[in-house]
Structure formats: C-alpha cells, structure tokens
Image (cartoon, grey):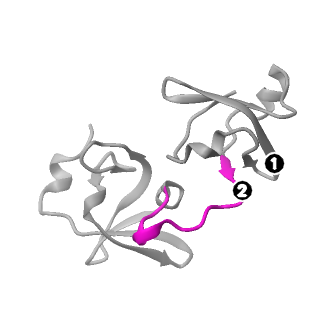
C-alpha cells in the first residue's frame, strides 16, 4: 500500500516496525521509497481487499517516540495546533508542515506560510496544542498562498 509520511524517522518503515491504524496494530513486512511516498507491505495484509480496508487510515508509531531534544516539536504535535502571536492574537491552525531549505514552513488553514524560525514557544491551552510565534510586521501579507 502507498503511505505518505509526515515523519523524517525512516526506521518506522523498517521490517518489524509497528504502526497503529486506530486500534489495529500493523507490522511492516517490507518497504521502499517511490517518489514522495513509501510502498509498504504489512504482515497479514496480503491482497488488495485487505489493503483497501486501510485506505485513508492515519498511521501512528507505537510506542510513541520520546520527545525530541532541545525543545523541538514532532510534526504530529504541530499539525492541528493553533498559532498565536505573543499578544495572544490567533493567526490560524496548522494544516501541514512543508520542508524548505532555509526553515520548515507551517502552513496555516488560510494559506499563510510561517517559517518555523519564528516559533518562540509552544504549549497547551484547554487541552489544545498552541504554537506561539513572533513575526516581523507584514510577513503574513507576503507569505500567503492565493
């Protein structure tokens, strides 16, 4: 089956790696890169019908990895987080993280692109992940997709 990753931890597709699809555990039998995706074969998913059941599933690593060093965030912690300024102005919600040669970009729900270098904090507010940014004036005006 074809899998798109939001992780840079390629050991998650090594044979024997365990991934979770809801309450179902999947064990990687084999995997190889194909363009911007991975072609992964899971133990017990031996035909097209079995693979179709998994279509659209979000796979998570089991067990969840330990927190990254240096106050970094995992992509799965960032996607869905609310982005706010230091003054608590809500800018939007992160829908994706795009790799970029200078700095990864947080893609907000309104199309704005926020370079990760401007992230100054993160936490939780009423159970929701929050990313705090300190942006130069006008950045969102020029960094917005149509």
Residue 7 x %, y %: 52, 47
Residue in the picture at 49% in, 69% down: 129
Q: Nearer the viewer, residue 19 or 17?
A: 17
Question: Secondary structure under badge 2?
Answer: loop
Q: In the rendered image, which quarter is residue 57 located in? A: top right
Question: Secondary structure under badge 1?
Answer: strand
Q: Residues within 10 Å of mark 1 (few under 14, many from 20)?
A: some
Q: In the rendered image, which quarter is residue 34 located in? A: top right
Residue 73 x %, y %: 45, 63
Where 128 falls versus 44 (above or below)? below
Q: Which residues are magenta?
A: 59-74
Residue in the picture at 55% in, 40% down: 5
Q: Nearer the viewer, residue 18 or 111?
A: 18
Asked if residue 17 is among those painted magenta in the image, a careful observer would answer no
- Asked whether, in this view, residue 16 is left or right of residue 89, the answer is right
Q: Are marks 1 and 2 in contact (CB under 8 Å)?
A: yes
Q: Nearer the viewer, residue 11 or 71?
A: 11
Residue 103 x %, y %: 28, 51
Q: CA distance from mark 1 to mark 2?
A: 8 Å
Residue in the picture at 24% in, 47% down: 102
Q: Which residue is under mark 1?
A: 25
Q: Which residue is under mark 2?
A: 62
């Amino acid at each position: 089956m074809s899998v798109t990753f939001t992780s840079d931890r390629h050991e998650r597709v090594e044979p024997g790696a365990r991934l979770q699809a809801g309450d179902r555990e999947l064990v990687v039998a084999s995997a190889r890169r194909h363009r911007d995706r991975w072609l992964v074969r899971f133990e017990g998913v031996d035909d097209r019908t079995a693979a179709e059941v998994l279509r659209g599933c979000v796979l998570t690593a089991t067990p969840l990895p330990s927190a990254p060093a240096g106050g970094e965030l995992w992509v799965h912690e960032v996607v869905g987080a609310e982005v706010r300024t230091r003054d608590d102005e809500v800018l939007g919600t992160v829908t994706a993280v795009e790799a970029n040669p200078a700095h990864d970009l947080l893609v907000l729900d309104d199309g704005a692109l926020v370079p990760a270098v401007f992230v100054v904090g993160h936490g939780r507010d009423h159970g929701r992940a929050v990313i705090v940014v300190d942006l130069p004036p006008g950045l969102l005006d020029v960094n917005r997709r149509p």
